[in-house]
Image (cartoon, coloured by chain):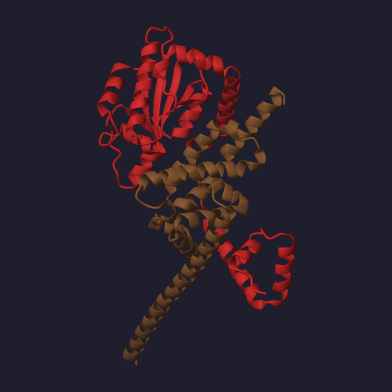
Amino acid sequence: MEFSTEIINAYADGELQGGEKIEFEKALSSNDELQKTLDDLYALKAQLQHAYQNVEAPVKQQESNGNYRVAAYMMFMLITFTGGWFSSEVLHNRMEMSNVNSVNPAMQVITEQPGKYILHISVNNNKKFKQTLDQAETLLANYQNVDQGIQLEIIANAGGLDLFRESTSPYAQRVKALSNEYPNIKFIACSNAVERLRKKGIEPDMINAVHHGVSAIDQVVKRVHEGWSYIKI
Amino acid sequence: MNIFKLTCRKVALVRRIESSRPKLYRMAYAWSHDAMLADDLVQEAQMLALQKIEQLKDEAAFDGWVYTILNNVWLGYLRKSRPSEDIERIVIADNNTPEHEMLVSQVDLMVRSAMTGLPNAQRQVVSLVDLDGLSYSEVASILQVPIGTVMSRLNRARGALGNSIKKNRLEQHNKTHVAFKAQKNNADNILRVVK
């Protein structure tokens, strides 16, 4: 009996069941050619697994510090979870605080603590770049007369990095102006994204006001751990 | 379910998202063959997973869920970086550096090189099935295609990989043979001079 290569694949991948499987195994015991095809398939699967088994994710800075990341993520989750119980109230307060019309509906608020915000941009999109800076200005303006003030970070990774590059940012002057005007705003470029550009032979040419040296995910987790509100643009 | 149980469940899920980094990275690398890009894709996927944690209702479906997120991030990257190309057919460059190549065996390099020559849709299917042992139905769900499509892509991918590896082996063998013959001729010439 002839079997299609799809059926032979399915057997090798453990996808054949019941009667089909029994029939296949029956043929296999008396068909050397079929056995050879199957052996070649197993060999190919093993070669593929072997070729990628030593591919390891780069070690993150914090991984050497015990369980920092796990603890931070747990805090992230707990704050998020707690936020869930009073999210509608918090969101309502936030909308009042920052003027309903100025808050972009596309932005996702994970958790909410007053006065400390981390805005995250990861796409190269001029409209989103503008939204990020608009949102930052709205927050800064709303907190200007509040005693405790505000601390704000804008972090960019992947395509979002272009917001902070002299040669690519349509808002380079605005970033510089914000940095000069407000000492409590910080611009951070993801170190992984910067490194990636360098590996491609591209000089990142960051705007002077921009800091780098930490990855986006580590910074977000750290800030959330410290009680900051995370807003993804 | 009481608050304590809900909290424990979410703590466990956050831990799973964090600990899924090595497998997500391996998959992202197999799809992109670019170490820095793979790291970015995984970082983005993990952040999205944390944001969407409430959407995961069935913990048994965790692997499929995180791979679906990774796939969406990867396809988003391809759409943006190569907007004029058909995503399913995109082949990739092998971004191995010479230092990197020294750390990987010739056979593994041959297999990886064959993978880069596959169209994206086939490379993704064969990676999900063979690197992580996912079932056809899981792969179909992650890539949002019918199971029949998974089977046919897998079939074409394995056929192409097998042929490419055989061809590379033959070329390698021929090169070694030519080098050996040249060496032998040199040795014979020297012997003749000495005699």
Q: Please give the name of the residue rendered at 44% of the width and 48% of the height, measured from the top-left corner.
A: B35
Please determine whether, in this image, residue B186 is positioned above or below residue A97: below
Q: Please give the name of the residue rendered at 37% of the width and 10% of the height, measured from the top-left corner.
A: A144
The residue lying toward the viewer, choosing from B178 and A41, is: A41
Q: Where residue A102 sits in the image (x, y, percent)? A: 39, 18
Q: Where residue B19 sits in the image (x, y, percent)? A: 58, 40
Q: Quadrant of the C terminus of chain A?
A: top left
* Chain represented in red: A
Q: Quadrant of the N terminus of chain A?
A: bottom right
Residue A5 visible in the shown view: yes
Please determine whether, in this image, residue B15 is positioned above or below residue A5: above
* Chain represented in brown: B
Give the residue furthest to the bottom: B195
Q: Where residue A204 sits in the image (x, y, percent)? A: 30, 39
Residue A188 relative to residue B151: left or right:
left
Residue B133 visible in the shown view: no
Residue A138 relative to residue A53: left or right:
left
The residue lying toward the viewer, choosing from A183 and B112, is: B112
